[in-house]
Image (spheres, rainbow, N blue to C red):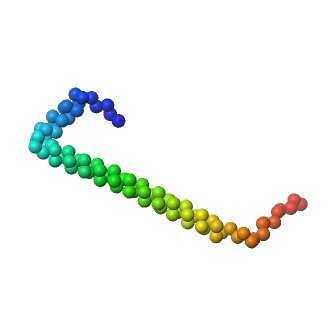
Amino acid sequence: MANIGFSELIVIFMILVLVFGASRLPALGETVGKTVRSFRRGVAENQDIDVTRADKLEADANVSDAELVDENAAPPAAKRDS
């Protein structure tokens, strides 16, 4: 990430005050905070869904493999060298 020093933060804050006004900055900060929380929550939920889907696919694959294996089948005949 970028290294932002104290002087750069002061400049950014002064620009924000000029653009939005001092009275609107708290509301802007609150809105940004809610947006970030919502984004993080959405990412976490998406990761949970992906893990659940992966587990289901793995379980389905294991069942399919088990169905393909016939325990009573004779092993394939060995090839003979002529």
Please count the marks in the image: 0
The residue positioned 12% from the left and 38% from the top of the image is 18
In the shown orientation, is residue 62 left or right of residue 46?
right
- Spot the residue most to the bottom: 72
The residue positioned 55% from the left and 61% from the top of the image is 58
For residue 70, above or below residue 16: below
Q: Position of residue 72 (x, y in %)?
A: 74, 71
For residue 61, above or below residue 26: below
In the shown orientation, is residue 75 left or right of residue 24?
right
Image-quadrant location for residue 6 = top left
Image-quadrant location for residue 68 = bottom right
In the shown orientation, is residue 29 left or right of residue 50?
left
- Spot the residue most to the right: 82
Q: Position of residue 26 (x, y in %)?
A: 16, 44
Q: Position of residue 2 (x, y in %)?
A: 32, 33
The residue positioned 22% from the left and 32% from the top of the image is 9
> In the rendered view of the protein, which quadrant contains the N terminus?
top left
Q: Position of residue 36 (x, y in %)?
A: 28, 48
> In the rendered view of the protein, which quadrant contains the C terminus?
bottom right
The residue positioned 33% from the left and 50% from the top of the image is 40
